[in-house]
């Protein structure tokens, strides 16, 4: 089954608005038709009630006037009175015809027929005989029956008006119930449709947002999927194209780092070995200025070698070919070896090293753990002012190895505590005259810590400077 898919977000919004408005429009139409029908029926009922009441009253008045004129004509015998009687008779006939044309009950129509027949007989007698004829005198007694019948019709019409009012009220109550039921059924339907289309509209936008965030985080391996209107799906396809291009650039960058690192390492090794030989005065004695220059050359060659090793380690991490070679690692001995490697720098900078190392062993890759600790110590040395203290601590806590490195440098701002672990991110510069780093040391350190099931974090420090803590499980299954 193929579902309908709009071509654009605007099209989806218009369709959603139309479908959401549809139940409300239906409810409005039903309410308008119901109220209009009720008003029309009420108007017709009210108009008929008014006409019936007026005609009934006119009928009673016409019968009264005919009786008065007939009796006056019987007594006086004047033709003028007979003519007035004839006029009231015509009025009576017109009123009866008006009432017969109205929607009356069967009983009222029957009374009207009786009333018309009786009056017609009386009219024939009064018109045919003289005013003092016995037949005319007897016919006058029929007016009492006419008046009673007319009064009965008026009373019945009043009852009919009351029943009509009750029907109008009942009809209004039915309309009210219908409108309430429509509101109960259609308003929630419109609300649910609103939620549905809100989800349909925002879901592809969230997918695009998540795709852009994944690209920003460097997650290029997972295919980006955007479902929804066609224009957003096309945007997802362009993001996938961008992902592939970024992945290609990332691979090219990794290859470049690998090649350039290897190319730089060979001549740098020759420079470092030459500076070591010159520092040991193998080729002859050096004066104080020459020894100072040789020491600077050696220190910077060591620093450059450290930067190249960081690039090599980073390229290995990015290529996902790095593996852990497990073994039993004595952390105290390993840390002491790292500090020994930095002994010359510590002495030249006159840094006050304050180690506090417990005997702790763990299961892990010794070389990667050495690089992990070396990166933290190198970073601390680089940012420490000359002659300042530097702390390196090792302890065991809750079946975990805890390593802390703290310096007396400028420290790490709160806004940078997570960013310093990003690749190529560099915080505040170190002392003037020193080689600026690549911004990979802490990134590699966190990768290696997490590879061992641990992590590295920046802690608050009561003293000036930065304080970093590594927590590693003693057993890899822990």
Image: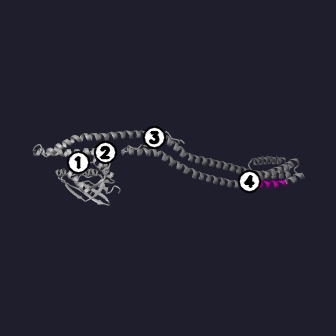
Q: Which callout, 1 or 4, points at the residue further toward the start of the chain? A: 4
| Residue 157 numbered mark, or none | 4
Q: Which callout, 3 or 2, points at the residue further toward the start of the chain? A: 3
Which residue is denoted by mark 2 in the rendering? 316
Q: Secondary structure at mark 1?
A: loop
Residue 230: horizontal and vertical position, in percent?
47, 39
Asked whether 361 or 305 is in front, the reply is 361
Q: Which callout, 4 or 3, points at the residue further toward the start of the chain? A: 4
- Examine the rendering and report whether any part of residue 385 can be seen: no
Which residue is denoted by mark 1 in the rendering? 430
Residue shown at 32% from the left, 48% from the top: 323
How far apart marks 4 and 2 lie (CA) works out to 105 Å
Which residue is denoted by mark 3 in the rendering? 233
Label 4 neighbour load within 10 Å: few <14, some 14-19, many 20+: many
Label 2 neighbour load within 10 Å: few <14, some 14-19, many 20+: some
Q: Which callout, 4 or 2, points at the residue further toward the start of the chain? A: 4
Residue shown at 68% from the left, 55% from the top: 166
Labels 1 & 4 near each other (Cβ < 8 A): no
Of badges 1 and 4, nearer the viewer stands 1
How far apart marks 1 and 3 lie (CA) works out to 48 Å
Above/below status of 152 relative to 433: below
How far apart marks 1 and 4 lie (CA) works out to 108 Å
Q: Which residues are magenta?
A: 141-154
Q: Secondary structure at mark 4?
A: helix
| Quarter placement of the N terminus | top right
């Amino acid at each position: 089954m193929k579902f309908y898919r709009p071509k654009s977000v605007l099209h989806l919004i218009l369709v959603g608005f139309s479908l959401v408005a549809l139940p409300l429009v239906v409810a409005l139409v039903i309410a308008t038709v119901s109220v209009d029908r009720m008003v029309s029926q009420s108007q017709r009922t009210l108009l008929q009630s008014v006409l019936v009441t007026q005609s009934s009253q006119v009928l009673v008045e016409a019968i009264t006037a005919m009786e008065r004129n007939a009796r006056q004509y019987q007594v006086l015998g004047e033709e003028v009175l007979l003519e007035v009687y004839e006029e009231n008779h015509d009025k009576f006939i017109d009123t009866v015809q008006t009432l017969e044309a109205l929607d009356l009950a069967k009983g009222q129509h029957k009374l009207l027929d009786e009333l018309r027949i009786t009056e017609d007989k009386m009219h024939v007698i009064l018109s045919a005989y003289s005013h003092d004829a016995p037949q005319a005198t007897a016919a006058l007694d029929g007016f009492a029956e006419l008046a009673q019948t007319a009064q009965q019709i008026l009373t019945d019409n009043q009852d009919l008006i009351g029943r009509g009012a009750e029907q109008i009220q009942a009809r209004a109550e039915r309309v009210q119930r219908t409108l309430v039921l429509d509101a109960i059924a259609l308003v929630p339907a419109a609300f649910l449709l609103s939620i549905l289309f809100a989800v349909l509209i925002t879901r592809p936008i969230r997918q695009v947002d998540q795709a852009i965030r994944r690209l920003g985080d460097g997650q290029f391996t997972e295919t980006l999927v955007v479902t929804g209107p066609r224009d957003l799906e096309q945007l997802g396809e362009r993001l996938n194209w961008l992902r592939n291009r970024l992945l290609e650039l990332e691979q090219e960058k990794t290859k470049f780092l690998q090649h350039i690192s290897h190319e730089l390492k060979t001549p740098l090794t020759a420079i470092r070995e030459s500076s070591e030989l010159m520092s040991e005065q193998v080729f002859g004695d050096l004066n104080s200025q020459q020894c100072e220059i040789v020491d600077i050359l050696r220190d910077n060659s060591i620093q450059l070698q450290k930067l190249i090793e960081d690039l090599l380690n980073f390229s290995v991490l990015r290529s996902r070919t790095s593996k852990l070679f497990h073994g039993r690692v004595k952390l105290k001995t390993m840390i002491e070896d790292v500090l020994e490697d930095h002994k010359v720098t510590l002495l030249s900078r006159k840094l006050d090293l304050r180690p506090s190392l417990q005997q702790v062993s763990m299961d892990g890759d010794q070389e990667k753990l050495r690089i992990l600790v070396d990166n933290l110590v190198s970073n601390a040395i680089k940012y420490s002012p000359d002659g300042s203290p530097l702390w390196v601590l090792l302890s065991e806590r809750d079946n975990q190895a805890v390593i802390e490195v703290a310096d007396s440098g400028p420290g790490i701002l709160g806004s940078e505590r997570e960013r310093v672990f990003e690749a190529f991110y560099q915080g505040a510069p170190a002392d003037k005259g020193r080689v600026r780093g690549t911004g990979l040391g802490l990134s590699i350190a966190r990768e290696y810590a997490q590879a061992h099931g641990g992590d590295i974090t920046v802690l608050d420090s009561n003293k000036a400077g930065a304080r970093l803590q590594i927590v590693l499980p003693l057993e890899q299954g822990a």
